[in-house]
Amino acid sequence: MAFDRLKTEISMLLTQMENQPGDKYEVHEMILEKLNEMRGFGLPLPDDLVELEAKLSKEIAKDQ
């Protein structure tokens, strides 16, 4: 099922982020990609993941 696969991939992304917190640009891009996949399937977006993506977007914008 597509939703289960996306949940697993998101879990793996969060684990990767915990293990390699310095590469926020890559993590941000991967989270955004997964959220867009979920939108494409018409699935509900996890609030905490949406909030994390927004925070990373603000940090990245501040860095530029």
Image (cartoon, helix red, strand yellow):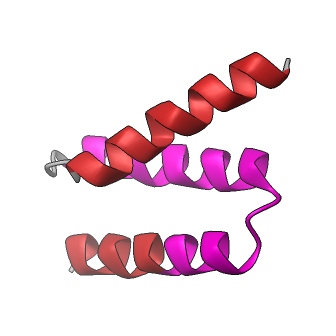
In what quadrant of the picture does the C terminus appear?
Answer: top right
| Image position of 39 with respect to 43: above or below | above
Q: Place residue 29 in its image quadrant.
A: top right
Q: Give the range drawn in magenta.
A: 12-41
Q: Residue at x 67, y 30 (%)?
A: 59
In what quadrant of the picture does the N terminus appear?
Answer: bottom left
Q: Position of residue 27 (x, y in %)?
A: 66, 56
Q: How many marks?
A: 0
Q: Is residue 30 magenta?
A: yes
Q: Main secondary structure of the magenta part?
A: helix
Note whether residue 36 is visible: no
| Image position of 1 with respect to 45: above or below | below
Note whether residue 5 is visible: yes
Q: Give the camera-side residue of 11 and 19.
A: 19
Q: Position of residue 22 (x, y in %)?
A: 82, 59
Q: Residue at x 29, y 43 (%)?
A: 40
Left of 63 or right of it: where is 7?
A: left
Q: Give the camera-side residue of 39 and 51.
A: 51
| Image position of 22 with respect to 60: above or below | below
Q: Does the magenta stretch include residue 20?
A: yes
Q: Where is residue 14 in the image (x, y as percent from the top left)?
A: 51, 71
Q: Give the camera-side residue of 37 and 24.
A: 24
Left of 55 or right of it: where is 1?
A: left
Q: Position of residue 63 (x, y in %)?
A: 83, 24
Q: Which residue is drawn at 55% across and 71% down?
A: 13
